[in-house]
Image: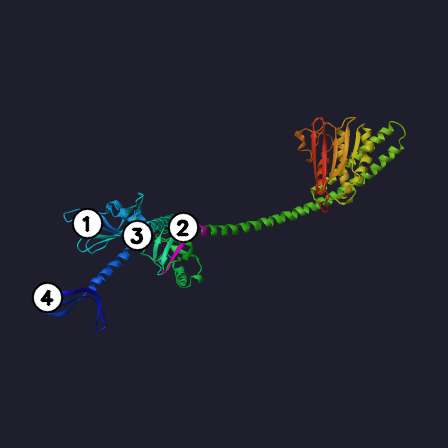
Amino acid sequence: MTTQLSASILGIEHLGDERVLVGLMARKISLFGHSFKISIYRDITAGKNTIELFRMSKFALDNATEMVLWINRSGLIVYSNQVTEHVLGYPKAELLNLNIKDVDATYSVTLDSNTTFTSTKRNESLLKESSFKKKSGDFFPVELSSVVNNNNAYTCIFARDISKRKALDKTLSDLECFHRAVFETTSNPTVIVDGNTNILRVNRAFELLTGFNKQAVEGIKSWTEFVSKNDIDRLLGFHYLRKEHPELCPDKHLFDIVDANGNLKNIYMTINKITGIEEFFCVASWLDITELRKTESELRLSYTQLEERVALRTIELNKTKLELEEHINKRIVSTRALIHDLKTNLTPMITASELFENCAKTEPLISLSRNITSGVKRLEKRINDLLDLARSEIGIFVIKPTWTNPTQFVKEIFNYLEPEVKRHSINFVLECPDSVPVAWVDEEQLSRVVINLISNAIKYTKRSGTITLRLFHNDQELIFEVQDTGCGISSTYIKDIFKLYHRYNTSGESGEGLGLGLYLSKVIVELHGGQIEVRSALNIGSTFIIKIPLTEGMC
């Protein structure tokens, strides 16, 4: 028997509608002078599928997003995918020379007689957390699952880097601790309830307010058990409205609760639905306003009592006001009568003294007549001062301002007093610009003030001294100054110089007169809306300054 041809090929045969992968071997045999062709078919479908499955499995492992390792019974790494090499930082050749202990020192391996891994059961996957070590020496957390093949020869380890998850877990844990701490330590009683009115959580302030500890409340009691009967139906209505239509429900409520001792407490509540979750939960913050309500009630009572006292006091004040007005009216009538009587009696005295002075031709009649005239005029001035004082005290002393030319005004005063100043051998100086804005003043009363200041300067300035009458202005004020080189005023007395009945002489003691001149000067200047002040130094002199507003209507 001889064989002339031997060949092996693959072909596809049809079995009905099913296609089968087969292997074909054909031979040509010569036997007894005859040639024969023998074909042998073999079904290789299962083997081919196994190869395909292996290729697909390897492709899947190589391109998996998780780290994949195969280790043998000794713990040596016999396979690693691309992700493992990238994450650990090893090239494949170097990684395949390592033991699993080089990557995960905590991996539990017991080398017993059968060299098996006690951490992994056959055909079962175990899930645990561990740490992998990179080539750089850095560690990072991983989640491991491993499975052993049927003959215990190899273990497949799947590892996932959980660094981000760990960081997120820590962040969430920290946030939970923070929110729990805030919840527990907030000074307001705070409650978390569900849609069925059950209390899920309360804080320490709630325990202190109600007298119930959280173990007896959380998950056991409904918030309705704390609310007074008068408020339950109203709050329940809002609770279910908030559950269905939170946008229609108010978030602030007033109600009463009953604590563990049966005490009624007034509560102001702010409540809101917790958003971002499917289930219905609400967080409510309570504020105990019991003391506030009590204080409010006491204040209301005090206010009522105060109103009563104010009403009684108002009646008394009105009575006093009427009596005072009656008294003032009587004083006005009396003052006017006094003015009339004094003026009536003084007028003939002045006329007689002037007539006597004109008729006197020889001494001592001339001196006597002058003394009488001078005395009568001083008396007239005193009477006028006293009358003006009375007018100012009862509020009837008024000024009558008109538009006045200040330059002409001071020149007239200067010309009027110049002979008197020179009679005392004192230099008299006028400093006055040609053009000054007109002023809204009572010329008669203001001239009285300036003349009084110059008269005082004459009194306290020695012979050959100087008195200066000065006028100037700025944008807001008209300013008069009367400056002398007299004895000056000590700082001890200068603060009282404009006070009523204050008198001052060169020795610093009480001087002559009634002490009304400077007081009335201050009254007149202030009626103009102005100010009067003084600057003085002992043995150098004094300067009195009058400031009058240039604006109409200030007086």
Q: Which mark is residue 188?
A: 2
- Distance from Cα at disc 3 to Cα at disc 2: 57 Å
Indicate the colouring scheme.
rainbow
Name the quadrant of the N terminus. bottom left
Question: Mark 2 and mark 4: span between their CA atoms?
Answer: 109 Å
Whole-percent x and y of residue 400?
A: 76, 45
* Inter-mark Cα distance, 1 to 3: 23 Å
Along the horizontal axis of the image, is 286 left or right of 356? left
Mark 1 crowd level (few <14, some 14–19, many ≥20, 10 Å Cα): some
Q: Residues within 10 Å of mark 2 (few under 14, many from 20)?
A: some
First reached walking from the N terminus: tag 3 or tag 2: 3
Residue at left 34%, top 56%?
199
N-terminal of the pair, mark 2 or mark 4, is 4
Circle 3: residue type:
Gln
Q: What residue does disc 4 label?
A: 1
Q: Is-magenta flag for residue 323?
A: no
> Residue at label 1?
73
Q: Nearer the viewer, residue 402 or 501?
A: 402
Give the residue at mark 3: 82
